[in-house]
Image (cartoon, grey):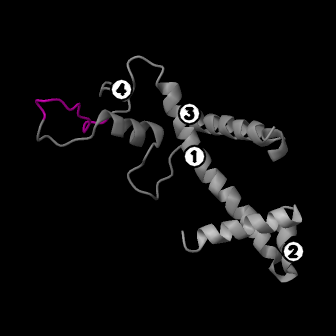
């Protein structure tokens, strides 16, 4: 990463600054045969954005649930908890089980199935939070860098 990644990003920034264009046009000015690299850069940026938005969705999900009292990941008295749920305290030193916070994340948030081949149902609450996250990102970026720099 440090040997190749940082110099390539610096080169990309320098090329973009020199031609004052986006990656597709800037790379085409540099070498027309390599014009596909600009489109690949845009595709990779989109994939990284989708990956980062998924973390933002989890952050909002936990934020919205943190306003409830008691916290849903605080005890094992919820409908999504399994029999393996174990509230750890001083009397349960050598007992194996999963904590309420693990079960909240794995069962409630991720809705993990027993095998990776099983497709679970769509979680509408996470889908709506993802829509909210994309709308927030859009409103943060819609006027471009010139607007945010003022």
How far separated are the C-alphas under marks 4 and 2? 57 Å
Residue 85 found in image quarter: top left
Closer to the camera: disc 2 or disc 3? 2
Q: Which residues are magenta?
A: 82-92
Q: Earlier in the sequence, mark 3 or mark 1?
A: 1
Q: Secondary structure at mark 4?
A: loop
Please tell me the numbered disc located at residue 54.
1
First in sequence: mark 2 or mark 1? Answer: 2
* Numbered disc 3: secondary structure: helix
Tag 2 secondary structure = helix
Residue 149 horizontal/vertical position (percent): 79, 41
Q: How far apart are the two marked residues, 4 and 3, measured between alpha carbons?
A: 21 Å
| Residue name at image x 62 percent, y 35 percent | 129
Residue under label 2: 28
| Residue lying at 53% horizontally and 43% vertically, measured from the top left | 121
Is 134 located above or below residue 11 in the figure? Answer: above
Instruction: Name the residue carrying label 3.
Output: 60
What residue is rendered at 11% in x and 41% in y?
94
Residue drawn at (66%, 71%), measured in percent from left and top? 8
Name the residue beneath numbered marker 4.
Answer: 78
Q: CA distance from mark 3 to mark 1?
A: 10 Å
What element does badge 1 sit on? helix
Mark closer to the chain start, 2 or 3: 2
Note whether 99 is above or below 69 in the view shown.
below
Q: CA distance from mark 2 to mark 1?
A: 33 Å
Q: Quadrant of residue 68?
A: top left
């Amino acid at each position: 990463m440090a040997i190749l990644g940082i110099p390539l990003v610096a080169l990309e920034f320098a090329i973009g600054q020199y031609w004052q264009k986006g990656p597709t046009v800037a790379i085409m000015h540099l070498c027309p045969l390599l014009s596909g690299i600009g489109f690949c850069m845009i595709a990779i940026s989109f994939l990284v954005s989708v990956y980062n938005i998924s973390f933002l969705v989890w952050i909002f999900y936990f934020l919205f649930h943190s306003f409830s009292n008691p916290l849903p990941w605080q005890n094992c008295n919820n409908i999504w908890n399994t029999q393996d749920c174990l509230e750890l305290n001083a009397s349960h030193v050598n007992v194996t089980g999963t904590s309420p916070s693990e079960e909240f994340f794995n069962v409630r948030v991720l809705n993990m199935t027993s095998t990776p081949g099983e497709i679970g149902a769509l979680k509408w609450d996470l889908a709506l939070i993802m829509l909210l996250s994309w709308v927030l990102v859009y409103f943060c970026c819609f006027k471009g860098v010139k607007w945010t720099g003022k």
